[in-house]
Amino acid sequence: MKTIFVAIIITVTLMNCQKTQLQSGNSTDPTDTIQVPVDTPIIGLGKGAVLKNDIAWSAPFNAWYHIHTHERFQLRAKIMYSNLIGESLFLHDIPCQIGNYLIEYELVSNFNNFTPEALFIMTSEWDQPIGDFKIDTTRTDHFIEVIKYDSIARTVEGRFQVFLKKEPSNTQWPGVPDSIFLTEGKFHLKIQEP
């Protein structure tokens, strides 16, 4: 009988210790381990990154305001390889507002409607086009998300994903794929004047 009484006392004491620990925030309860978001950028200022067909694409990123307004901006990334093949990504007509935006297919000359557009271009030496890629209209999971925008510091931070298909009118060139998918894209850039 004495053993049962000691066991009850120990159990009650342990339950009170756990209750005190939960109330003080030192819990091991999984529901209390959810971390509050920290206000840190997803990538360093002046940087952009994306996976091109599941491989890291190391092109430098830039952001530019629209030529007539500071209400929209565009992202550009361009790289030239040692074999004189160049690749350029253009994301146009992105609103300077926090939000998630669908990237749609529009004529590139029409980037004035607050509908983000994407274009990927491959060129040979002397900027001869060897592959133009536009939005794959069979998919609906293209997006660009503006996470932070600071109009005073003129910085923008966000992420994107886009799937592109080669325009059929392009001539065949060895090594040019039929499609390009850009995933896990992120950027944190100072927006430049046009």
Image (cartoon, grey):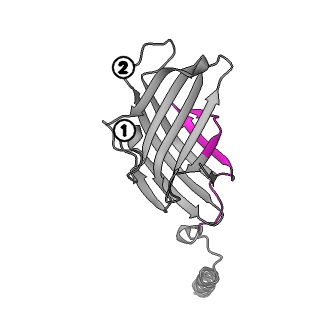
Q: Residue at x 55, y 32 (%)?
A: 88
Of 12 and 46, which appears nearest the observer? 46
Of 1 and 42, which appears nearest the observer? 42
Q: Which residues are magenta?
A: 37-62
Q: Residue at x 36, y 38 (%)?
A: 107
* x and y percentages locating residue 180 in the rendered image: 46, 30
Which element is circle 2 on?
A: loop
Q: Quadrant of residue 42?
A: bottom right
Q: Which numbered dot is residue 107?
A: 1
Which element is circle 1 on?
A: loop
Q: Residue at x 53, y 43 (%)?
A: 184
Q: Which numbered dot is residue 169?
A: 2
* x and y percentages locating residue 183 in the rendered image: 50, 40
What is the distance, in whole Å, between disc 1 and disc 2 at their CAs?
16 Å
Upstream in sequence: badge 1 or badge 2: 1
Q: Amino acid at mark 1?
A: Leu
* x and y percentages locating residue 22 in the rendered image: 60, 80
Q: Is residue 74 magenta?
A: no
| Up/down of 131 relative to 148, above or below | above
